[in-house]
Structure formats: C-alpha cells, structure tokens
C-alpha cells in the first residue's frame, strides 16, 4: 500500500505555480498565489475569531472562490470543514449542524438563487447551540446576523487579517466531513484526513488525464459533495484551470464549456442529459476529451446520444466513504463504458464481490456484495464508532452496501444497492437488468423497477417516463418485455409518470426507490 507521507492541503496549494491560473469565476481570474494568500489571511481571521484545531466549521456556500478559501483556511488551522449541501432546508441544516457540533457557520445570506436566510429562519436556534458565531460572505457590513443571538463576522474582515505564519494542521488532521444521502436513515458524517484528500486528488489527476497540458475543467457539481469536491481538489492538484458555475444551469454550462475550451468535467446522467437538451449545436463542446458520468436516473440511450454529439461519456464509481472518482470505466463502446464502476484510479485500490451469507469472495462475473479498499478510504463516521465498525471489515475493506461483480482486468461493475435487489420466481434479480431492457423500448426515457407488494408480491413493478412526444401504455410495455425476458422477470405493472421521484444530493438527484416501493404496494 502506498504511504501517504507528509501531504497536507496547505502544502499542496502552496506548492502550485504561483502565477498559474487556478479559478475562472465569471469575469474574475484567480492565480494559485491569490488562492493561497487568501487562505492564509482567512486562516488568521478564523484563529482571531476563536477557531481552534479540531473545531467544526460548516461551509454552506455555492460554488464561489470563498468556498475554497475557507476550506483551505480551515485546513491551515487544523479545523474540520463540514460541507453543507446548498439544497438542504431547515430540518436538514438543523440536524447536521447541530449533531456535528459546528462552532462556526459560513454562508452567503444575500445569494439570489438560494434563500439561505429564509431557510435559516426556520431552524430551531436551540438546536444550533454549538454555533458560536456566523461568518457571512458578500454582505453589507451593517447587515444583521442571520442567526439571532450569534455574533456575525464578515468575510472581508477575515480576509483583511495578516497571513497565518505557521500551519496548524498536519497530514493526519481530520479536515473534511461529507454527509451521506440519508435516504433510508439519518445522514452519517464521513470524516477524511488531509493526506488522504491530497493523495486521492493526485491519483485522480493521473487516472482522469487532468495532467494533459491543455486540460481545463468545468465545475458544475457543488463543492459540498464528495463528487464535486474530488474534481475540484484534483484540478488544483494538477494545476489546471477550474471554471466555476455558481449553481448548475444546463444552457449556461454548455456556454461555459464552449467559451473556455473545457476538456473535462464530471456530472450525473441527469445533468448531461439536460445539457444536451439545452443546446442543439451538433458538437456543443468541441474541445471535450471526456465527461465522467454517474448514473443515478437510468436514462436510456444516453451514451450513444452523447457520442453522436461529440461528448464521450465514461462511467464512474465513488461514494463519500471512499471519495468520489474512486473508479473510472476504460474507453470502449459508448453504452458499455457508461456502466457505473470501472477500474480503481489508485494502483492500490482493490474491489471484491462477496457472498452475503458466507462472506467468501466470488469469482469474476458473479454478482455479490461489493467491498473495496484503497488509500482514499475515510477515517470513519464522525461520532459513530458503531457504524464505523459495522462498515469496515477486519482486513480493511469497506462494505459499500452495493451489489456488483468484478471483471478480469481488476475492475468491477455496480448493479444496484443491496436493498434494491429483487427476488422474483425464487431468483435474485438486479433492478438494473430489467431497467436496461425496458429502456430499449423507443418510447421509454427513464425507468426504475422495484419489488411489488400486496397482490403483486414476488413480482416486479416498473415506473416509466416517456420520451417527449412519444406514447406507450402498460399493455405495450408488458408485451415488449415478454418478448425478451423470462416470464418471471416481466413486471406485473407498469406505471407511467411525468418524472421519477428523486431526492437531491450534492452528487446528483437519486431515484427515491423507497417511495416507489410504497407506491407499488399501495397501487397494487
């Protein structure tokens, strides 16, 4: 296993070419020296505000340079940045900031696209008793504190402090908390240390080709999620320009990609589908090398459609616990290379599929519970030793909760969440198998398959959205499935929806399969 060494976030940033272009934020340009100097000043400002090593600082900002400045400032101080999803609302902010014990909350109250102040007004102030002060960005000096009773510090004041002279964070210092999606339980707090963040960033640079001399990256994923964070850290580690989009807008993203000659970015399948819909140019991104794409929505024909427009997509795999961009599919057939999974970007990354009952490792091609290891693994779940012990095996593998199979080249393919597997006709069937087949129907845009209930117990139930201007019905879809699937795999019902229900996450919208299971039972 590779030794992580003495790598810290501050050393990584300070070692970049001072005059190199780091960030493009609208009309402003940031050199690496600008970012490093600002982080030293804000670090000193945090210390003057009472922040100490180990303190949690919640960063609740969109994709603006201040997010990165505060993040690196926290690393210099040895504080832990709690990455708050900008889509969170009152109950989620109350829970996460409160349970993680944040002493400081950083936000932009006046941001026009997200009503941070209004959301915060709905939070029970007593639940945030650990928060001692609020830092506001881009706000008038006389504006009141968005959290009554807490002193407010203005970002500009922190940025006017003298630079911090000595780094207080080390390679083993905890530095980042990501929150899990919490679709089935309360979000867990995934804790990473500095050396792991830096090491993974450098491996992503090599694995994704960000070391190309012409590489320019587009940041449409939010910094607050493991997915967007990993890309941003890799862009910095590779000393490549990062074009920021404050919040995602499909048409604007295409224009940014075109005007700045972007070569790489990462996104969800839903995001790239919206981008392709928003721009009818035959080749909308003429400089693109490839787009890393996480499949959350199961949109049919996306790989081929993007390929026709000159936008090669490659499937990814990652999660907060192992950092996003853990694996990348090699080049190949447009649809095959879009499968979630791939080869670990780290030469020390290892993945196995195990039998859920015996724990024995399964041969290549046989679906089992995916477990993985490598230098990008988390320190653990902050404040939850029991969950950490349950998640990590005795030999250091992380139990992902996913199903999949390994391939002979050392890679793997994700087939679904363990809790989503279907038991049909006495056999275990991955929903993705049925979804992939149903999406071959020309009228189907997206599909999700769950287990039925009531009269349809032991059968599959499909939820389908259709392509614009196209029509199908339940009988047509059933007949289509009967032509190519074993009888026990043909869904008992097909429900046509305008949209699949999703839950927002910083890494992309995820289909709410628990809700679909409830619908399948109540609509049986």
Image (spheres, rainbow, N blue to C red):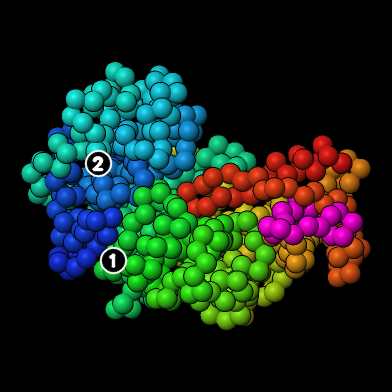
In this rendering, position of residue 374 left or right of residue 401:
left
Residue 320 appears anywhere in the view: no
In this rendering, position of residue 489 left or right of residue 71:
right
Residue 52's quadrant in the figure? top left
According to the image, label 1 marks what residue? 241
Q: Which mark is residue 53?
A: 2
Does residue 471 show up magenta in the picture?
yes
In this rendering, position of residue 143 left or right of residue 176:
left
Q: Residue at x 32, y 43 (%)?
A: 80
Task: Categorize mark 2 by other alpha carbons within 10 Å: few (<14), some (14-19), many (20+).
Answer: some
Q: Which residues are magenta?
A: 462-477
Residue 213 appears anywhere in the view: yes
Identify the secondary structure beneath mark 2.
loop
Residue 125's quadrant in the figure? top left
Q: Residue at x 57, y 76 (%)?
A: 308
Does residue 254 show up magenta in the picture?
no
Q: Earlier in the sequence, mark 2 or mark 1?
A: 2
Q: Residue at x 57, y 81 (%)?
A: 332
Q: Locate the N terminus by quadrant.
A: bottom left
């Amino acid at each position: 296993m590779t030794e992580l060494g003495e790598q810290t976030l501050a050393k990584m940033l300070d070692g970049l070419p001072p005059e190199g272009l780091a960030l493009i934020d609208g009309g402003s340009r940031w050199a690496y020296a600008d970012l490093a100097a600002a982080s030293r000043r804000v670090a000193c400002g945090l210390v003057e505000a009472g922040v100490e090593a180990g303190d949690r600082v919640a960063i609740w900002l969109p994709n603006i340079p201040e997010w990165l400045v505060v993040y690196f400032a926290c690393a210099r101080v040895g504080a832990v940045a709690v990455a708050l999803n900008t889509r969170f609302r009152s109950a989620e902010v109350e829970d996460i900031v409160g349970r993680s014990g944040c002493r400081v909350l950083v936000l932009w109250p006046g941001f026009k696209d997200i009503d941070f102040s209004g959301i915060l007004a709905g939070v029970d102030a007593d639940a945030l008793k650990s928060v001692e002060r609020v830092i506001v960005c881009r706000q008038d000096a006389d504006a009141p504190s968005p959290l009554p009773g807490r002193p407010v510090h203005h970002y500009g004041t922190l940025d006017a402090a003298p630079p911090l002279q000595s780094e207080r964070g080390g390679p083993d210092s905890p530095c980042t908390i990501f929150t899990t999606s919490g679709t089935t339980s309360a979000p867990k707090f995934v804790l990473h240390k500095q050396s792991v963040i830096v090491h993974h960033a450098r491996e992503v640079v090599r694995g994704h080709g960000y070391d190309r001399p012409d590489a320019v990256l587009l940041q449409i994923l939010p910094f607050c999620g493991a997915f967007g964070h990993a890309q941003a850290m890799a862009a910095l580690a590779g000393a490549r320009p990062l074009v920021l989009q404050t919040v995602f807008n499909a048409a604007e993203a295409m224009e940014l990609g075109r005007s700045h000659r972007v070569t790489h970015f990462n996104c969800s399948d839903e995001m790239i589908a919206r981008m392709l819909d928003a721009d009818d140019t035959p080749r909308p991104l003429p400089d693109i090398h490839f787009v890393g794409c996480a499949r959350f929505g199961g949109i049919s024909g996306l790989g081929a459609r993007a390929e026709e427009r000159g936008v090669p997509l490659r499937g990814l795999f990652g999660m907060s616990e192992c950092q996003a961009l853990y694996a990348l599919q090699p080049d190949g057939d447009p649809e095959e290379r879009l499968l979630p999974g791939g080869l670990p970007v780290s030469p020390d990354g290892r993945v196995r599929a195990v039998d859920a009952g015996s724990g024995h490792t399964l041969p290549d091609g046989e679906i089992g519970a995916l477990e993985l290891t490598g230098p990008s693994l988390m320190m653990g779940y902050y404040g939850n030793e029991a969950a950490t012990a349950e998640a990590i095996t005795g030999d250091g593998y992380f139990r992902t909760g996913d199903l999949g199979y390994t391939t002979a080249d050392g890679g793997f393919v994700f087939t679904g969440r363990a809790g989503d597997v279907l038991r049909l006709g006495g056999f275990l069937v991955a929903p993705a198998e049925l979804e992939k087949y149903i999406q071959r129907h020309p009228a189907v845009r997206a599909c999700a398959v769950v287990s039925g209930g009531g009269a349809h117990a032991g059968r599959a139930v499909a939820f389908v959205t259709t392509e614009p201007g196209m029509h199908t019905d339940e009988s047509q879809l059933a007949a289509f499935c009967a032509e190519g699937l074993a009888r026990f795999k043909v869904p008992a019902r097909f429900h046509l929806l305008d949209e699949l229900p999703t839950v927002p996450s910083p890494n992309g919208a995820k289909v709410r399969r628990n809700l679909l299971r409830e619908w399948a039972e109540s609509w049986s």
